Amino acid sequence: MDASSDEGVVTEEVVVPQRVERRAAEPWDAQSVDSTDGSAQNRLLIKGGRVVNDDMMQDADVYIEDGIIKQVGTNLHTPGGTRVVEAKGHLVMPGGIDTHTHMQLPFMGTFAVDDFYTGTRAALAGGTTMIMDFAIPQKGESLVEAYHRWRSWADPKVCCDYALHVGVTWWCDKVGKEMEELTEEHGINSFKMFMAYKDTWQLDDHDLLESFKQCKEIGALAQVHAENGDIIKENTAKLLDMGITGPEGHELSRPEEVEAEATNRACVLANQIGCPLYICNIMSKSAASALGEHRRRGTLVWGETIAAALGTDGSHYYNPCWQHAAGHVLSPPLRNDSSTPSSLMELLDVGDLQTTGTDNCTFSASQKALGKDDFTKIPNGVNGVEDRMSVIWEKGVVSGKIDPCKFVAVTSTNAAKIFNIYPKKGRIAVGSDADIVVWNPHATRTISAKTHYQAVDFNIFEGMEVHGIADYVICHGRVVVEEGNVRAVSGMGKFVPTPSHSPYVYGRVQERDIANAPKKVDRAPYDGPVIQLNNQGLTQAVESSIIPTNQEFYTRGAQMNDKSPKRPSVKVHNPPGGKASGSFW
Ligand code: URP
Ligand code: ZN
């Protein structure tokens, strides 16, 4: 498949001359790793494949220099010594962007076992060339410090590019200021608020509103983990009382409507602020339908689902093997409904859902066993970063639900647009980063923990046969996967800053605010009589008519009036719930 070329032909049919403007140096650049190495690998020709973007397919070659796509077309002129990757019969697509990972996350008393090295190497193996991870401060902790901690973990280890979202797990004015600093100085354009994980990361509605307001102020995207943590706490206590301690309790404590309620509430709150919203890891038909209704009403909201929800379901929680059932525990949970995966795929096709992540947050059997006697102690999280592209290809394209262009849209392009890194990422075009997967749509493989690259000892897709394999993966112009072999080096990926005010997200916000601004009604002032309130807010007219009798009802609570030492009360003839002679209500 591989050869050298010194074709000296004149360039023809070069398409999409879409230049990516190189920006001036930003503060975060100093910490980035240089992606070029000055070797012959800097020049690469992908020859004879079919280029697939989200809006078009064409047979074309792709010429890459110094990590950037320089030409797309046929009969390209390329310098001598250019390495050639033969792609005949293959699809040449933008590398995947996994919008939702948690590498080495400290969580539930332990750390996710796939770190920024094993996790990103596995990502590359499956055709994903960029991940978006979450820096999550503990309650009371500085967001900026959490950001730096995650950078210090990731920068030396990442094999592919990565960006960060930052969690908002508590609220005060300082948090708002740090959000601004992160956006202006550290390349963060999205913040995630949790509506679940009561007593640790959960925000109440007031704090959600404050964080949404601040996101809007600084042009960042508000994300939510949408589950009602208060209901989950109630349900959990009941289930444990009933003696349900196994992994099925996890799913039973967080039913679909608990996810749908939070999804709806987040949409309402964000819409009231006029803040664009992104719902993370939508796992159920009910939550997706709440989101869809809001989108049709015009709410600026986008939805992500994950490979787990598209590739498997919650029947596994009822498996008699504890280890197997616990291996599927994540939040929100998989749904015990075999029609959910295909419904979610259909919603990706029609555009109700836009992106796919994985929520990759892996724990091995001995870590999951922390919850062997109590499902609330099973560390939440599953794999996916390696298999997402294959699972979506299999369940989406092979099943005929989506076409290859839609596959590209939901695995990279939409994410690049939403998070404001398009067309640098998510497109095969001149000027874009050379992050490319050469996809063999005919080859098959069987997913297994025994053969996967991830460090975790379990795979939720175990035994699934998938068509679609990343034969070659090119990251920043380097061939990092070659006929199934990964040749990634830790630290060769780099941090990708995500600029604020994504036009795809914020493009309509100002106009909407102006168009929907409340309008004052000009009218003649009221000039009739106005009753007087006393210092308890009661009208004098009402107060003067108080004459307690046996048949009357009285308001509760302190009623002392400064001016009158007797205890006034308000006569009510029809109390709510009906009259109850002689009693208070
Ligand atoms: O189960 C999950 N999702 N674990 C990671 C933490 C989170 O909720 O994103
Ligand atoms: Zn997550």
Image: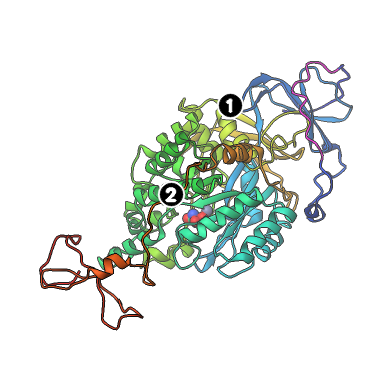
Pointer 1 residue:
405
Is residue 479 toward the left or the right of residue 372 in the image?
right
Q: Which of the two residues, 534 or 446, is positioned nearer the viewer here?
A: 534
Q: Main secondary structure of the magenta part?
A: loop
The residue that appears at 47% across and 36% down in the rendered structure is 295
Residue 435 placed where, x, y %?
A: 71, 37
Classify mark 1: helix, strand or loop: helix
Q: Which of the two residues, 387 or 559, is positioned nearer the viewer here?
A: 559
Residue 237 placed where, x, y %?
A: 32, 66
Look at the picture and state if 537 lies above or below 11: below
Within 10 angstroms of label 2, few (less than 14), some, or many (20 or more) residues? few
Within 10 angstroms of label 1, few (less than 14), some, or many (20 or more) residues? some
Asked if residue 19 can be seen in this view, the reply is yes
Residue 422 placed where, x, y %?
A: 69, 36
Amino acid found under the numbered disc labelled 2: Tyr
Is residue 54 toward the left or the right of residue 338 in the image?
right
Amino acid found under the numbered disc labelled 1: Cys
Magenta extent: 11-22
Classify mark 2: helix, strand or loop: loop
Q: Is residue 21 magenta?
A: yes
Look at the picture and state if 113 lies above or below 535: above
**In this rendering, which labeled residue sits more in front, label 2 or label 1?**
2
Look at the picture and state if 405 lies above or below 104: above
Q: Is residue 273 magenta?
A: no
Pointer 2 residue:
526
Asked if residue 96 can be seen in this view, the reply is no
